Amino acid sequence: MKVKLQEDVLKNQNLAASFNRKTFNAHHLFVVNLMSSPGAGKTTLLEETVKALKQEYTIGVIEGDLATERDALRLRRLGVATVQINTVGGCHLDARMVAKTLPEFDLKEIDLLFIENIGNLVCPSSYDLGQGKKVVILSVPEGNDKIPKYPVMFKRTDMTVINKIDLLPYVDFSLVQAEADLATINSEARLMSVSAQTGEGMEEWLDWLREGVKSCKEQ
Ligand code: MG
Ligand code: ZN
């Protein structure tokens, strides 16, 4: 069954966000909006997540990029339905762009939908896509100052994933400091640390996703 889009949804941001939310809820779909700066490892984390969960769930991916179809190709190679959004220079995804992709998915079949946002720690946090959860990925080579310097991003997020922890011995990054900084900005936000490369910490991340899928199914 395909989603039908009404014309006005594509004209108005708030309408589009609530259309997306209603559509996701109606399909008991767990939707994760993945945000980070460029190079934090969103696509790699997504690839490893898909590999680990694709036997359990039907997964869909919306790939946002300024240009190219590279990341979408990486996900399609794993056999998941993936729709690419090219923003042609636009620095964030908005709800209308996401709404536009929904007719391309068979949402009834999908349990878990990832939206990979544009690599940018600033404005993606201000755009409600109608998602279930917002996740921000911070990689250790970026340094500890990202949390205090981009407070809005970390304030409005449900989960912070510290990625590339396999590089901790080589870079100046403190997990304890990151935890303390995050707690100051957002006492509700959760933090976990992973290496998508080595698989360290991935089980906790996957369990968090499983919990999300489960609670959406029960709604
Ligand atoms: Mg990417
Ligand atoms: Zn922007």
Image (tube, rainbow, N blue to C red):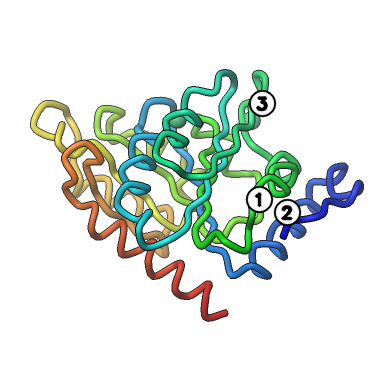
Query: Can residue 152 be seen by looking at this rendering?
Result: no
- Image height of 57 relative to 146, above or below: below
**C-alpha span from label 3 to label 1:** 16 Å
Where residue 66 appears, as percent x and y from the top left, is 59, 22
Q: Amino acid at mark 1?
A: Asp
Q: Amino acid at mark 3?
A: Thr
Badge 2 vs badge 1, beta-carbon distance below 8 Å: yes
- In the picture, the quarter occupied by the C terminus is bottom right
- Residue assigned mark 3: 87
Bin the neighbour count of mark 2 within 10 Å (Cα to Cα): few under 14, some 14-19, many 20 and up: many
In this rendered view, identify the residue nearer to me: 34 or 155.
Answer: 34
Question: What is the secondary structure assignment of the residue under circle 1?
Answer: loop
Query: Can residue 204 be seen by looking at this rendering?
Result: yes
Q: Which mark is residue 17?
A: 2
Q: Which residue is painted at 39% across and 61% down in the image?
A: 209
> Where ligand 2 lies, by image quadrant?
top right
Mark in the foreground, 3 or 1: 3
Q: Amino acid at mark 2?
A: Ala
Q: Which residue is painted at 27% across and 52% down in the image?
A: 180
**C-alpha span from label 2 to label 1:** 6 Å
- In the picture, the quarter occupied by the N terminus is bottom right
Where residue 215 appears, as percent x and y from the top left, is 48, 75
Q: Which residue is painted at 76% across and 56% down in the image?
A: 3
- Residue assigned mark 1: 128
Where residue 8 appears, as percent x and y from the top left, is 91, 48
Where residue 136 appears, as percent x and y from the top left, is 43, 45
